[in-house]
Image (cartoon, grey):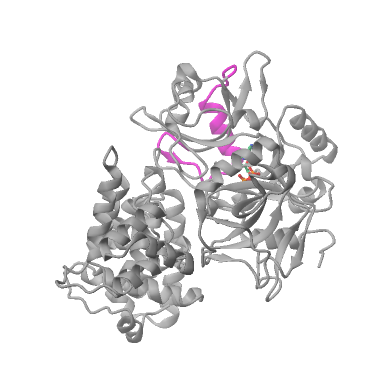
Amino acid sequence: CFSTADTKSKLGMTWKEGDDVPYSVLCKTFEACEATTKRLEITEYLVTLFVEVIKKKPTDLLSTLYMCINKLCPDYEGLELGIGESLLMKAVAESTGRTLKVIQKDYHKTGDLGTVAKNSKSSQSTLFKPKRLTVTHVFKTLTKIAEVKGNSAQANKVGHIKGLLVACEDNEAKYLIRQLEGKLRIGLAEQTVLSALAHSIVLSKPESAKMKTEQKEQKLTYAVDLVKSVYNQLPSYNMILPALLEHPLDELKERCKMRAGIPLKPMLAHPTKSLTEVLDRFEGHPFTCEFKYDGERAQIHKLPDGSTKIYSRNSEDMSIRYPDVVEKLKKWIKPTTSSFILDCEAVAWDREKKCILPFQVLSTRKRKDVKEEEITVQVAIFAFDCLYMNGESLLQESLRTRREKLLEGFQETENEFFFAQHMDTDNIEDIQTFLDVSIKKNCEGLMVKIYDGEEASYEPSKRSRNWLKVKKDYLGTGGVGDSMDLVVVGAFLGKGKRTNVYGSFLLGCYDPNSGDYQTVCKLGTGFSDENLKDFYETLKNYTIPTVPRYYQIGDNPEAPDVWFEPKVVWEVKCADLSISPRYMAGVGLVDETRGISLRFPRFIRIRDDKEAEDSTTNEQIVEFYESQSNGHD
Ligand code: ATP
């Protein structure tokens, strides 16, 4: 991917060396990315931008990069955009002199508040020209907007937004509003941004101009693999960028090592439909079976300074949600253990009967303002992996070694802390018995993992085939091997018994490449009356006036009565999957125009530990479809 002079002039890369990066350049890059679906083209635009920034104002690279992924800081710092549309409409109205009614009407028509802001600006005549916006100024102001708290927070936010809007020109208002909404949605997946970053580091070095094409391509591939693998272990651009900019690429791994206090993206597992499938897949490899506990993933960190942090599967800081765990942790650690990162499941626990309680009990535990003395749902921690200990990364070690470290460094403590129960055998009857015991003990089934050798290393952020999940509920059904986690994108008003609430829902899966949601089924089964009332109350806050452009809904959809922002994720079970012209999941992957849909979907539970972007992807849906025993069409 080499940036050309044409691309440079298209993106308006004419600002002076040493000057701040103009916001207009970033917005032109966004516009170019939005106009194509080709990943290579998108990468080229980004590389052109990054190389230019590195050349002219390297200190602006961090804010430029964060703006491209529409974040303000690493996920674990928890500072997010996502300003409500009513506040944004107010700011657009006040800064352009149009009435709120007109803005609302335009929004109903276009479904994109960014476009409404841009059009409102172009119909406005301005007497004086404010200073042009720079990327760093916009980034700093967005950060301030996200940080504002207290009584006059709303007015303060509107003030900042108006200040930016007034200075917007051309398409800047469009992208500014989308950034504030927290949904840029121009197809900039984080993986693409990481590749572009790696390319631009190589291409901005003077020696790259002298490299032969083949040598350059090798170097680019090396850089992409390196940057992605380092980012998986240390997901912080604040730490990686300085190392990339100031030191040779070959030193990156050494300079940016994983550390306690910075959460890794966890390794995930592949679903299977039978124990024989597991045995076939792992033939010739030693493997181990563990109970699959049904709770909430918890990555527990102990820092060298003695402090403790607990992170969710999304790298969200949950330490204040689990003050009881933070308090008890010291009893579980052997004296030789100083710093560590453990991969665990937090499970609701009955201290009297000394048994695991179902997931539903855990979900009733308070999530905010948790005070230790008020906790009613007790948890026990089941540790299944040790990723880091006493300053050393264990990711490259085999699971056997990591388990040994876990057993050496910690001690089980009644009612509080346990090692995940495991059995190392390849005898199918023994595995079946172990699976039955796991179910009796309120687990979901088994996790089966490669135990020795290179494939037994820990692969952060990957849904790996070296970890297989076997869920009891899905064995022997002949359909799919797992449930799916889908986003509620719309709802149909209820009739009869369901009058006054939503009666059924339109669900979608996520396409991480484009950032779009693709419809996958209509769901009306599996709810209690209580569920329906609760969902109505929650979802009505997320209604949007029209179908957004990032929902792929098919040619002739049964349009729901209301559309929602992509916020709520539900776990759904189905009998099987079929190709359907009405739905769009995986369109273009199995069939050019038709998508895949779930047959006989049934609601299982809310997944509030997942963001919309963590929902089942279009590619996973295709895998489920293709792995069906008798592919339906
Ligand atoms: P699921 O709905 O199955 O939890 P998921 O997408 O959240 O799906 P998967 O990778 O599919 O995650 O399933 C693995 C999850 O199971 C882990 O995220 C973890 O929370 C949980 N888990 C429970 N016991 C174990 C174990 N012994 N090893 C690994 N993960 C475990």
Position of residue 269 measured from the top left corner of the image (x, y, whole percent): 64, 48
| Image-quadrant location for residue 178 | bottom left
Which image quadrant: the N terminus? Answer: bottom left
| Image-quadrant location for residue 289 | top right
What residue is rendered at 35% in x and 52% in y? 87
Which image quadrant: the C terminus? Answer: bottom right
What residue is rendered at 59% in x and 32% in y? 363
Whether residue 210 is situated above or below residue 166 in the rendered picture: below
Range of magenta residues = 388-415
Whether residue 261 is situated above or below residue 567 in the rendered picture: above
Left or right, 629 with reference to 281: right
In front here: 127 or 150? 127
What residue is rendered at 57% in x and 38% in y? 401
| Image-quadrant location for residue 577 | bottom right
In front here: 354 or 135? 135
Which residue is the extreme one toward the top? 352
Whether residue 305 is situated above or below residue 155 in the rendered picture: above
Q: Can residue 479 be seen in the rendering of this structure? A: yes
Left or right, 194 with reference to 530: left
Position of residue 106 measured from the top left corner of the image (x, y, whole percent): 42, 67
Position of residue 253 measured from the top left corner of the image (x, y, whole percent): 39, 54
Position of residue 555 measured from the top left corner of the image (x, y, whole percent): 66, 73
Q: Is residue 435 magenta?
A: no
> Looking at the image, in which quadrant does ligand 1 appear?
top right
In front here: 350 or 331? 350
Whether residue 154 is situated above or below residue 51 in the rendered picture: above
Count of all numbered marks drawn on residues in the image: 0
Q: Is residue 408 magenta?
A: yes
Which residue is the extreme one toward the left? 128
Q: Can residue 50 be seen in the rendering of this structure? A: no
Left or right, 82 with reference to 398: left
